[in-house]
């Protein structure tokens, strides 16, 4: 938090009143801390006594049980799970990986899928995307991961369209009915900050273990941005297009079907892109509830420290992510192009026909050459063991080992552990006051009040120490990421060439499922606190770098020119012109970094942490829905506190600067 | 103006924007000004407007941005529901129409052209033009035939399969015009149709528009903020300011006798000789002795400049299209206008 403090110019009108409130809060907090240091603080002011903590989890369990069994929700959900959803999943699983279910046609030969990917890539984005599409699937097959990759894909091809449809319908409803949008908004912001483990357990309980639960969790996870994008797109339809539709005599349904939704095409497709990417990210994580696929394999390989194979699976996931992302983004920008009149039918549908022809052709070919249908156990090109040896011997080099070990020692002993112990030593009320004063100072009264409410709830949840550890990890990682990310961004923003390449790298890195970031962390630092912080750090640095570059390069050129003509040095220009104007945008990046960190810290439970994530992961093995929910909500509330404070600052600042 | 019943007849129309416009209008004292209404937290988009549009007439509504002209035309087509007063289209109160009847009215009688075209980006030219026909459920073959017909009419033949973004601004507006004409409307609304185009294209489109109007003879409500455009096209001009109509009259009368100071300011810089027609300036014959060839009453003073300067008659007879003398023009008055003298 200390990092942000230097970034706030206190220029608000109410800054004096605000300073007074903040000072009062800080003084009280300090008094409490001092009292504890001298030993006169009563224990009930240090930590909330066990007896005062309400049995939230148990109460929730009772409520859940009531809804689940007495109201019979479980029968509904189980019916969906065992009926239509399972049917869809079985069908896609049969086609892609050859599961023995109706329609008993699969598996489709890998070569046929690769060639279709190439044609689709060509259709939306030319030869480069064609090569990317084909390359991804050829790699997957050649490296011997076809089956697990298709287990993952078979869930995505069901979950993504369902999430799209549901998101579209809910988005339209939210756009149409104000009360529905008002109701949905807070739910969506909680959903977007809720740790993914919290999605998993209810999914398992209500939709039984296996692909159905995975699909449900994935769909739930992917819907919110689709809703938001749909609503946004519909609101942005130009009034004249709407009036043109009305004057053409459209009925309400015709308006929606022929005017609104097609006119919102771009936003809807951006939503599709986000749905696909979130589905991939989530599907990989469903490994934690035992869903087979790339995620499960990666989890197993990392668990047994097989770095070579982990690396290869990581590459597959990254390739899939990049392919899906690039293709869906290319689709967003692709605009229809006309055919001359009298173009014959086959020419209008040339691409589809070619795709179909090649698809059938490769299916037939694979009957002749089995290697085109399936790459067998002995035939694949995986170099897992060799890469393993290379990585491990590289890491064992004296220079590398010395560096990482020193870093590990330094961070652990000199930075992380003392910081953690300090945070843990602060009495609960003082801690809450510190957070509130931060939120108040940054965002103003409303975020301050919410911070007080949210953190008080956390304090009474009975998981205070673990929450503090979660927060400690997030703060350390984001602070380190800021130290690295902002200078990097500033340097990159100096030249257009570097900005462009680094932005591209960041955009690509943001499409990777978060799970991937664990691989380098474990490789470099093994299984410990430093690896956790490191994985969060690289994950959170991406948005920081990205928004620093975007912020600095979006400063209007006439302002920098004015600074140049006023004779400012590069440093003066940066400090007094570029930074102040870029700060609101950079704050968006900072906010995103914090949100990413909260997300990642939970996943890092896999490495072995002592925070909320660890407890959450444990609940997955059982049926403690109430506890799971309380833990998840704690994470969500802490994340929301920061989100509200920083967003509120950003908006106020943008308004003050006349941006937007 | 025709003798038959007006096509559109608006009486005391109000359109207020604000928290609860209806009850506010009821409590509104007579003669409250635009600024006072604004101080009460309401915006008077249309303020007590009464106007009629005759069959086959071209009424141009002129005003600066925010004067309420677009709002007024949207009240005529009930894109906006009015707060008070009545609007009748062909004798029928449009505020009393059900949603179905309103849709039917738009499907059969009204066409509208928009400033930024309002084309559907995902449809080809052909499909955009056929859109209103498709909405009313005409079969594919019919609507294609009709759409091709209108596309030809606006001169876009050969571009049927293009998408809007593949066309220039002028071409896009031709699509907008074609679409509005596809259902053969009786009433044609044009909301600043040429404002988004650059000057040369604008001129060309105005000519095109006049050509179409000559052919089709529709009842037209045309909106513009360009006084020259208004003068060029209008049978009558309604000048609006702060939601109210300042003056509604023929171009000649507006230029010669501005009703308010605001209107006068508009006409100040106008070359009156190019606007005023001989017949507009003519006085009744009233027994004056007339000699020599009459001048054409439909010509502007500017067009008559040579005659006016060279002729030495004090009074010139003015004739209509058929050559019948309808009035008399004082040469001095006409010369004063020509020379810009007051």
Image: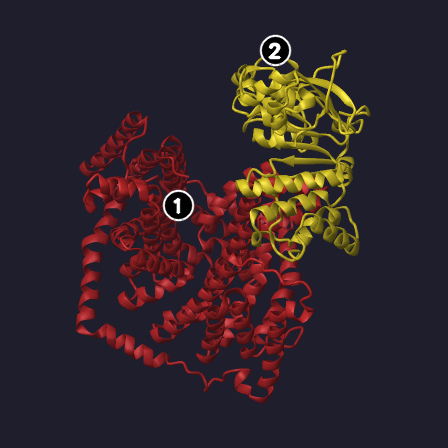
User: Which circle marks residue B50 in the picture?
Assistant: none
Of A47 and A187, the residue lying toward us: A187
Disc 2 packing (10 Å; few <14; some 14–19; many ≥20): few
The chain that hosts pointer 1 is: A
Residue B150, percent from left and from top? 72, 49
In this structure image, what is the colour of chain B? yellow
What colour scheme does the image use? by chain
User: Which circle marks residue A639 in the picture?
Assistant: 1
What is the distance, in whole Å, between disc 2 and disc 1 at their CAs?
57 Å
Of A599 and B55, the residue lying toward us: B55
Of A433 and A99, the residue lying toward us: A99
Of B136 and B72, the residue lying toward us: B72
Q: In this orientation, does residue A623 appear? A: no
Residue B227: quadrant of the picture = top right
Q: Quadrant of the N terminus of chain B?
A: top right
SS at badge 2: loop
Q: Quadrant of the C terminus of chain B?
A: top right
Residue A428, percent from left and from top? 31, 39
- Report the residue marked by disc 2: B31
In the image, residue B44 above or below residue A155: above
| Picture mark count | 2
Q: Residue at 65% across / 48% down in the picture? A: B175
Front: mark 2 or 1: 2
In the image, residue A393 above or below residue A480: below
The chain that hosts pointer 2 is: B
SS at badge 1: helix
Q: In this orientation, does residue A423 appear? A: yes
In this structure image, what is the colour of chain A? red
Residue B301: quadrant of the picture = top right
Disc 1 packing (10 Å; few <14; some 14–19; many ≥20): many
**Does residue A587 appear left or right of residue A231 in this picture?**
left
Residue A346, percent from left and from top? 67, 71
């Amino acid at each position: 938090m200390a990092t942000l403090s230097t970034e706030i110019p206190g220029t608000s009108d109410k800054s004096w009143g605000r300073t007074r409130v903040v000072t009062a809060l800080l003084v009280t907090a300090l008094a409490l801390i001092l009292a504890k240091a001298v030993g006169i603080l009563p224990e009930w002011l240090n930590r909330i006594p066990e007896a005062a903590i309400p049995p939230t989890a148990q109460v929730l369990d009772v409520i859940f049980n009531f809804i689940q069994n007495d109201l019979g929700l479980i029968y509904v959900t189980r019916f969906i799970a065992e009926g239509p959803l399972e049917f869809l999943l079985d069908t896609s699983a049969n086609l892609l990986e050859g599961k023995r279910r109706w329609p008993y046609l699969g598996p489709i030969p890998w070569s046929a899928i690769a060639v279709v990917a190439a044609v689709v890539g060509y259709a939306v984005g030319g030869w480069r995307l064609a090569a990317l599409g084909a390359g991804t699937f050829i790699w997957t097959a050649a490296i011997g991961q076809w089956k697990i990759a298709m287990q993952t894909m078979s869930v995505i091809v069901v979950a993504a369209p369902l999430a799209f449809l549901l998101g579209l319908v809910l988005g339209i409803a939210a756009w149409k009915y104000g009360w529905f949008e008002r109701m949905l908004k807070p739910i969506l912001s909680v959903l977007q900050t809720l740790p993914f483990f919290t999605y998993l357990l209810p999914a398992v309980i209500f939709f039984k273990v296996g692909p159905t639960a995975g699909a449900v969790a994935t769909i739930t996870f992917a819907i919110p941005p689709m809703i938001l994008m749909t609503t946004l797109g519909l609101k942005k339809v130009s009034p004249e297009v709407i009036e043109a539709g009305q004057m053409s005599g459209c009925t309400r349904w015709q308006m929606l079907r022929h005017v609104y939704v097609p006119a919102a095409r771009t936003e809807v497709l951006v939503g599709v892109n986000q749905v696909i990417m979130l589905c991939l990210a989530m599907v990989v994580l469903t490994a934690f509830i035992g869903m087979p696929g790339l995620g499960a394999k990666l989890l197993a390989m990392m668990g047994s420290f097989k770095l070579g194979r982990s690396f290869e699976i990581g590459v597959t996931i990254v390739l899939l992510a990049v392919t899906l992302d690039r293709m869906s983004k290319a689709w967003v920008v692709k605009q229809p192009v006309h055919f001359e009149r009298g173009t014959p039918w086959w020419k209008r549908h040339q691409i589809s026909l070619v795709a179909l022809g090649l698809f059938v052709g490769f299916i037939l070919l694979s009957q002749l050459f089995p290697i085109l249908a399936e790459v067998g156990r002995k035939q694949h090109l995986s170099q897992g063991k060799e890469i393993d040896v290379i990585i491990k011997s590289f890491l064992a080099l004296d220079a590398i080992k010395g560096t990482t070990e020193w870093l590990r020692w330094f961070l652990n002993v000199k930075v992380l552990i003392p910081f953690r112990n300090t945070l843990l030593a602060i009495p609960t009320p003082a801690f809450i006051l510190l957070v509130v004063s931060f939120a108040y100072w940054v965002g103003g009264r409303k975020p301050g009040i919410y911070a007080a409410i949210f953190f008080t709830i956390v304090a009474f949840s009975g998981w205070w120490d673990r929450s503090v550890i979660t927060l400690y990890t997030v703060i350390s990682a984001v602070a380190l990421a800021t130290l690295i990310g902002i200078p990097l961004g500033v340097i990159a923003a100096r030249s257009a060439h570097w900005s462009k390449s680094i932005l591209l790298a960041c955009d690509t890195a943001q499409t990777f499922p978060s799970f991937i970031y664990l691989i380098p962390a474990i490789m470099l630092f093994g299984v410990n606190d430093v690896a956790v912080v490191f994985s969060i750090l690289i994950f959170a640095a991406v948005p920081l770098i990205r928004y620093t570059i975007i912020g600095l390069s979006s400063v209007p050129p006439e302002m920098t020119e004015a600074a140049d003509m006023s004779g400012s040095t590069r440093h003066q220009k940066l400090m007094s012109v570029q930074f102040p104007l870029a700060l609101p945008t950079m704050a968006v990046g900072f906010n995103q970094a914090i949100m990413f960190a909260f997300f990642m810290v939970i996943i890092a439970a896999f490495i072995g942490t002592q925070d909320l994530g660890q407890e959450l992961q444990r609940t997955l093995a059982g049926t403690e829905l109430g506890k799971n929910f309380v833990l998840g909500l704690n994470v969500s509330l802490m994340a929301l506190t920061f989100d509200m404070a920083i967003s509120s600052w950003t908006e106020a600042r943008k308004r003050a600067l006349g941006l937007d | 103006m025709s003798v038959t019943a007006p096509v559109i007849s608006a009486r005391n129309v109000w359109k207020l924007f604000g928290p609860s416009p209806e009850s506010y209008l009821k409590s509104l004292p007579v003669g409250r000004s635009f600024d006072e209404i604004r101080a009460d937290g309401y915006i008077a988009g249309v303020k007590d407007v009464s106007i009629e549009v005759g069959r086959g007439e071209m009424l141009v509504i002129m005003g600066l941005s925010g004067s309420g002209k677009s709002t007024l035309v949207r009240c005529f087509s009930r894109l906006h529901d009015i707060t008070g007063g009545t609007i009748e289209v062909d004798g029928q109160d449009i505020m009393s129409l059900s949603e179905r009847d309103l849709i039917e009215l738009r499907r059969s009688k009204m066409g509208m052209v928009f400033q930024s075209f309002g084309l559907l980006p995902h449809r080809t030219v052909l499909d955009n033009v056929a859109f209103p026909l498709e909405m009313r459920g005409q079969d594919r073959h019919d609507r294609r035939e009709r759409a091709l017909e209108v596309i030809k009419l606006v001169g876009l033949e050969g571009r049927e399969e293009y998408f809007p973004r593949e066309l220039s601004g002028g071409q896009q507006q031709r699509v907008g015009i074609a679409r509005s004409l596809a259902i053969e409307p009786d009433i044609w609304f044009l909301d600043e149709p040429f404002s988004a185009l650059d000057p040369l294209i604008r001129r060309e489109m105005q000519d095109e528009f006049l050509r179409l109007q000559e052919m089709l003879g529709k009842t037209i409500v045309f909106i513009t903020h360009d006084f020259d455009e208004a003068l060029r096209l209008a049978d009558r001009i309604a000048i609006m300011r702060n939601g109210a109509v300042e003056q509604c009259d023929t171009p000649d009368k507006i230029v010669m006798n501005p009703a308010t100071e605001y209107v006068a300011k508009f006409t100040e810089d106008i070359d009156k000789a190019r606007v005023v027609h001989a017949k507009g300036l003519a006085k009744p014959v009233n027994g004056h002795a007339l000699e020599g060839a009459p001048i054409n009453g439909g010509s502007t003073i500017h067009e008559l400049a040579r005659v006016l300067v060279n002729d030495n008659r004090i009074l010139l007879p003015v004739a209509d299209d058929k050559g019948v003398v309808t009035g008399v023009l004082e040469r001095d008055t006409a010369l004063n206008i020509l020379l810009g003298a007051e």
